[in-house]
Image (spheres, helix red, strand yellow):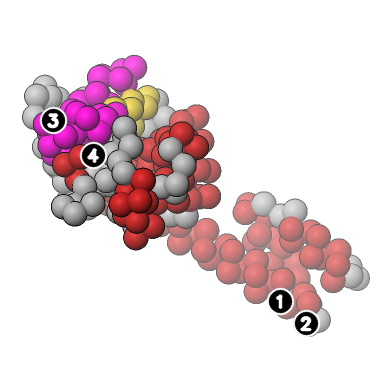
Amino acid sequence: MKSITEIKNEYKACEISGLSGFIASYENDDRTGAEALVRQAKKKLSDYEAELVRTEEMKKYEKQYSQYDLICGIDEVGRGPLAGPVVACAVILKKDCNILYINDSKKISARKREELYEKIMAEALAVGIGQVENTRIDEINILQATYEAMRQAIQNLKIKPDILLNDAVTIPGVDIKQVPIIKGDAKSISIAAASIVAKVTRDRLMEEYDSVYPGYNFASNKGYGSKEHMQAVKRLGITPIHRKTFIPDGL
């Protein structure tokens, strides 16, 4: 009979595909350690199966518009911050894309977003990024800047999509069929993938700005109006990346 340590090591090395076999091998072992490991394996398998179901549900709109070969999801991040650009992303996933855990970027940890970013960038058919800086935002307003960033993202795709799934908006000046989906980043795997890439792209940029403009803690607040950020603006003044039209009166 294997020791609990040996069984534990076997569990640690076990891939998802081997969990059912692991459970079958040890579910009749009445030792406390073995029972605990079997419970862990069952939960891990159950969570994985639930994620498969959730991911399929996230493909609802992709299935609805499956007559289109190249389906592109579009989302943006950075509409609300006091500093930094607004960043948009357009992503065309493979029709058989099976990347798990893609979701609205706000619902995923920073570490998980980084992991998914790498997978999406490696497996997507095409990814386009659009970025509109703070000075342009001040010039044309944040809504128009968001549209501009989205148009840039579409233009920066290496292939032209057949249809756009957008998070809530209809983008002016685009000659491709558009489907605006309210809370699309939580309902469409393509839009969710775009939200993740846009979020990671902008977060990395703001982390770089943190070293260029120390004292504002951009690495942490990403340009949003945290108490610490507002105090820094009052103490140090605005930087070249601040949106002047976003700074509250009195600062």
Quarter-wise, where is residue 158 in the image? top left
Disc number lying in front (2 or 3): 3
Q: Pick whichever of labels 3 and 4 is earlier in the sequence.
A: 3
The residue nearer to you, when weighing 247 against 101, is: 247
* 105 to the left or right of 68: right
Q: Position of residue 247 (x, y in %)?
A: 21, 47
Looking at the rendered image, the quarter that the N terminus falls into is bottom right
Q: Where is residue 131 in the image (x, y as percent from the top left)?
A: 29, 29
Q: How far is the residue under mark 3 from the one under mark 1?
A: 61 Å
Amino acid type, label 3: Glu
Disc number lying in front (4 or 2): 4
Q: Main secondary structure of the magenta part?
A: helix
Q: How far is the residue under mark 4 from the one under mark 2?
A: 60 Å
The residue located at (38%, 38%) in the rendering is 202
Residue identifier under label 2: 32
Amino acid type, label 2: Thr
Q: Residue furthest left?
A: 172
Residue identifier under label 1: 36
The residue nearer to you, when weighing 62 against 251, is: 251
Q: Dot 1: what SS? A: helix
Residue identifier under label 4: 243
Magenta residues (range): 131-160
Residue identifier under label 3: 139
